Image: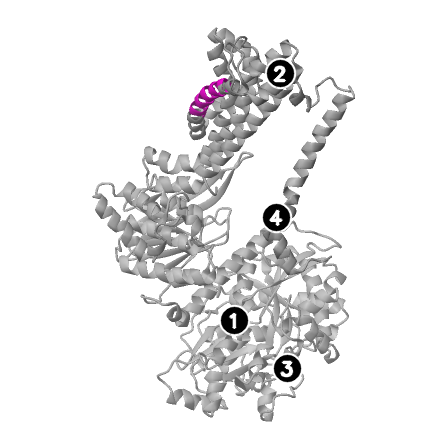
Amino acid sequence: MVPTPASRKAASSSPLGWLTKSSANWLPPLLGTGGFLLLWQILSMTGLIALPAPASLFTEERTRTLILYPFYDRGGLDKGLFWQTLASLSRVAQGYTLAAIVGIAVGITIGLKPGINRAFDPLFQFLRMVAPLAWVPIALVLFQKNQPAAIFVIFITAIWPILINTAEGVRQIPQDYRNVALVLQMSSRRFFTKVLIPSALPYIFTGLRISIGLAWLAIIAAEIVMPGSVGIGFFVWDAYQQNYVGEIVLGVIWIGAIGLVLDRLMAWLQTRISPGQ
Amino acid sequence: MTTTPAPSLVEVRDIDKSFALKGGGSYLALQGIDLEIHKGEFISLIGHSGCGKSTLLNMIAGLDLPSEGTVLLDGEAIKRPGPDKMVVFQNYSLLPWLSVRENIALAVDEVMGKIGSSERDAIVQEHIDMVGLGPAAAKLPLQLSGGMRQRVAIARALAIRPKLLLLDEPFGALDALTRGNLQEKLMQICNEHELTAVMVTHDVDEAVLLSDRIVMLTNGPGSNIGGILEVDIPRPRTRLEVVHHPSYYSLRSEIIYFLNRQKRVKQWRSRPHAVVARHGLEKVNLDLGFLPLAASAPLAVAKAHGLFAKHGLDAVSLIRETSWRGIVDGLVDGTLDASLMPAGMPTWMTAGGHGGTPLPIVTPLTLSRNGNGITLGRRLAEQGVRTVEDYRAYLKSHEREPHTMGIVHETSMHNLLLRYWLAANGIDPDKDVHLQALPPAQMLADLKDGSIDGYCVGAPWLDRAIRDGHGIAVAGDLAIWPGHPAKVLGLREDWAVAYPNTHIALTKALLEACQYCADPAHWAELSELLSDRRYLGIKPEMIRFSEASADVDRGGKESEAAVPHHLFFGEGLNRPSRTEHLWMMTQMARWAEIPLPRNWVEILERVCQVGVFSTAARELGLEALSYQRQGIELFDGQAFNADDPIGYLNSQTIKRDFSIAEIPLASPRRA
């Protein structure tokens, strides 16, 4: 039947109608995710893979407790997922903040001074290729203690995108703006606040957004080798050691979800701070 | 040079600018630029993209430093940019995160930090109001239109009270209406504040409207100042006044000519120019110049019918110029191998009439005869002016008014015939009227609006006005000098010496084309051919060669005068005639266009390449053409004695103070 204009209008005004109309948006991801879970369920039930089926996360006692009671605290390392995450996030916050401060400062410097850039660029390019896990032993040797070592690993992983993007942002300040500053003989303080930072801000935020993802990746690596500390990374590693496969799966899903939330949060912040650019 | 020590604010002294290239080496953008800018002057820099006009502006701004030479502001070398020479950039260069007010305040706060903040606020507000942006003061640049943004940029520049305002294509990205408004605004502000400004532009009208002087830059590499035009239109100006000022069109056409010339040279440079020798000819790749005229038919025919190729010239390009001046320049700088030209041009250039050193030009062939006529405007016809006697009486009774008649070029037969005709009828062509060189298409418009009395021009422009009812024909070919030479083939003597066989082949191809054009059976086809946009780009029925026109319903004499009687080929028609060239040289000397050469015998010997013509005619089996023409006698019956041109000149009553001089010519050499 060809919908008449009237019926179409009626369909779009009711909630059901809206749902039907926007189905192109929500239907494919739903089908994709659902299909994936279904396949996983079937493969697990037929014994083709050793992983527990998704449904077992709810049927199994240990994982169900973890899902239902994220805030429990039985002392020691036996804490709910919320506390585990919080501990990890606080490490990330420290390492990431440090990376942002140093990264933006160094990025601006090398962006403004091509000479310094040429001197250090090979080093930076080399260092940023080192995987987070490879930094762990070095960090432990450097700091001797778990906590600062973990923060260092996060810092060193997260700094490169911030640094490189900031430098690029500074280099990309349009010649027009530089010319305006030159012609007006702007003081460097005013140039910094009125021209450089606003102009480079979109680039800086791109760096910050990439880095938050990397920092969250690095926390897992850092915590896996930090025995005896609360944190989502160690939680997964501990589960593996004790052969709680269900807990591993749950931990991994949790990690992915947090990472996604952090990324969205940065994206939102970006649109708030530098709108329309 | 000047005796008045006008205060010059900026002095650009002999600067060069080169840029290092990526692959090593360097690009010379500007070379030997010298310019003085006086206080209160508005200067435009105009030229094609990439000619270095923005580079020059940047060096005045101090944003860039010259490789050689110096730029002085108030006697001090400009080493760095500063607010005393504020720039309005093409793309506005507003900071998008600051509002209109903040953008202007940023500049004012930075530059005028010493005065109180309330005074600074007042200055900001004053300039926001000056450009009429009060209601938009709190908006961000992205929320504004292009025109409004540029107004902010101008306000920002003016707010800091610069000694010198530099504008880099300020209105280039704006629509025509906005551009017009902003130009008027800028003009008004400049007048009120007596600003000194330098503006880069590629808009000819904008340059004429705003400037006191227009600096025209040649194309790079190594651009320099190709010419400076003074705009003598009084201020304050309005657009309408400027457009109607008598200087407007000549300034405009001067700039457009300059820009076209630059384009032509650039095109020429971009093509390969190695001399291609083939088929026993020294050069087969030729660029031939022509103007959109019915008399260009032989060139068009030779191209269309493969006559060039038949005689071995495989790669001939026809280059359409808009004015004879373009042909002169093309021959001088060597971008043209040969060209269609007015019959008087070879001797004129050989005698140095084009203002440079004498450049020997030779002609092996007369391409066309007749095709000209004198037209008077309808305004005169309505007052009863129908004959030259009427016109003489009319001039007497309207002595106070300016009387202008249009010609195409001083060397063309139009000029020489019109002057002769006027003088023979007791009208002094310089004192009683004013003859002005105008592009043919513009003459028509000028005749229509009555700013010229009449003109002498070739077909198809001759009969166009009559058909459209804007004028009447008072004298045609038959009434002045039947069979007068009109257009010839001209080329440089050094070229002729370097490529003697090509010279003959070219003459043969065009002589054969002339033969084709002379056949009335082909005229319809010729009209069709010439109507193409590569040639004339007008309707074929507008292009006539000799047939009487049926749709002119005036008297028999008039309709005959309005008809071109083109002759392209025939006994004694094509052979270059020394007598005729001497007559033309004598006429040009009579009107002080050139001195009468004392060595006129030598000049005629060299200009008229009778030998080349005879060889070409013989090889085509057309020996009969070598017949010598008789002496010259025009409508007034006065005989021209080719043995005594000086005596002839002395016997004329109406003439200028002519001079006689030896024209030193180098012996013919290879190019």
| Distance between the alpha carbons at the discs numbered 3 and 4 | 82 Å
Residue under label 2, please give it. Answer: A62
Image spot of residue B343 (x, y percent)? 57, 72
Measure how far apart labels 1 and 2 are at the Cα level.
98 Å
Closest to the camera, between mark 2 and mark 4, is 2
Task: Look at the image and say whether residue A88 sits in the magenta stretch.
Answer: yes
Q: Are marks 2 and 4 on the same chain?
A: yes
- Most foreground residue, B21 or B296: B21
Q: Which residue is mark 4?
A: A18
Considering only order in the chain, which callout, 4 or 2, is on the residue closer to the N terminus?
4
Residue at image location 71% in from the left, 69% down from the top: B301
> Separation of disc 2 and disc 3 at Cα?
112 Å
Residues rendered magenta in the picture: A87-103
Q: Is residue B464 above or below residue A60?
A: below
Task: Look at discs 2 and 3 and give the one toward the viewer.
Answer: 2
Residue holding disc 3? B565
Chain holding disc 2: A
Quadrant of the image occupied by residue B180: bottom left
Residue annotated with mark 1: B439
- Give the secondary structure at mark 1: loop
